[in-house]
Image (spheres, helix red, strand yellow):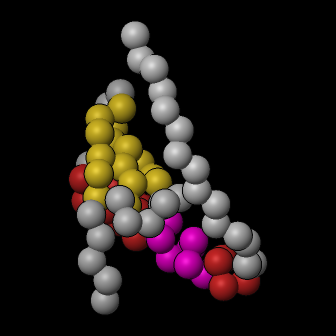
Amino acid sequence: MSKFTIEYWRDGDGLVGRLKEVPGVISQGDTLPELRDNLKDAYHLLMSESTKVQRPVKTASIMLSVA
C-alpha cells in the first residue's frame, strides 16, 4: 500500500486536487471523500495505462515573473 499527499483547493462549488507525489493525477469532487475516491481512480487508471504505453518523462525548470 502506498501513501500519498493530496493537495486540494476550492473551485466554484467543488474541490480540485492532485497527488503531490504523482504528477498527472488530478481530479475533482463535490466533497473531500468524493475527491479522494476520484483521485484513487485516477491513480489506478494512470498506473494501468503506464504499463501498456511506455513514454519518456521529461521535466523542466522555468522562472515566472508575476507582477
What residue sits 66% from the left and 85% below the top?
A: 51
User: In terms of image quadrants, where is residue 16?
Assistant: top left
Q: Quadrant of residue 12?
A: top left
How far across and down, in percent of the image, does residue 52 sit? 73, 83
Identify the residue at the far top of this view: 67
Please give the name of the residue rendered at 56% of the width and 78% of the height, measured from the top-left corner.
47
Whether residue 16 is visible to the viewer of this picture, yes or no, is yes
Give the answer, above or below, for where 50 lies relative to 31.
below
Front residue (pair 53, 10): 53
- Please say whether residue 41 is visible from this viewpoint: no
Quadrant location of the N terminus in the rendered image: bottom left
Residue 45 occupies which quadrant of the picture? bottom right
- The residue located at (50%, 76%) in the rendering is 44
Residue reaching furthest to the bottom: 1
**Up-down: is 2 above or below 21?**
below
Side (left or right) of 26 relative to 21 = right
- Magenta span: helix, strand or loop, mainly? helix
Closer to the camera, 1 or 41?
1
> On the rendered image, what quadrant is the C terminus found in?
top left
Where in the figure is residue 3, as x and y percent of width and height? 27, 77
Q: Position of residue 41 (x, y in %)?
A: 46, 70
Highlighted range, magenta? 42-48
- Tally of numbered tags: 0
Query: In the rendered structure, does residue 44 fall within the stretch colored magenta?
Result: yes
Q: Is residue 37 magenta?
A: no
Residue plotted at (35% across, 59% down): 20
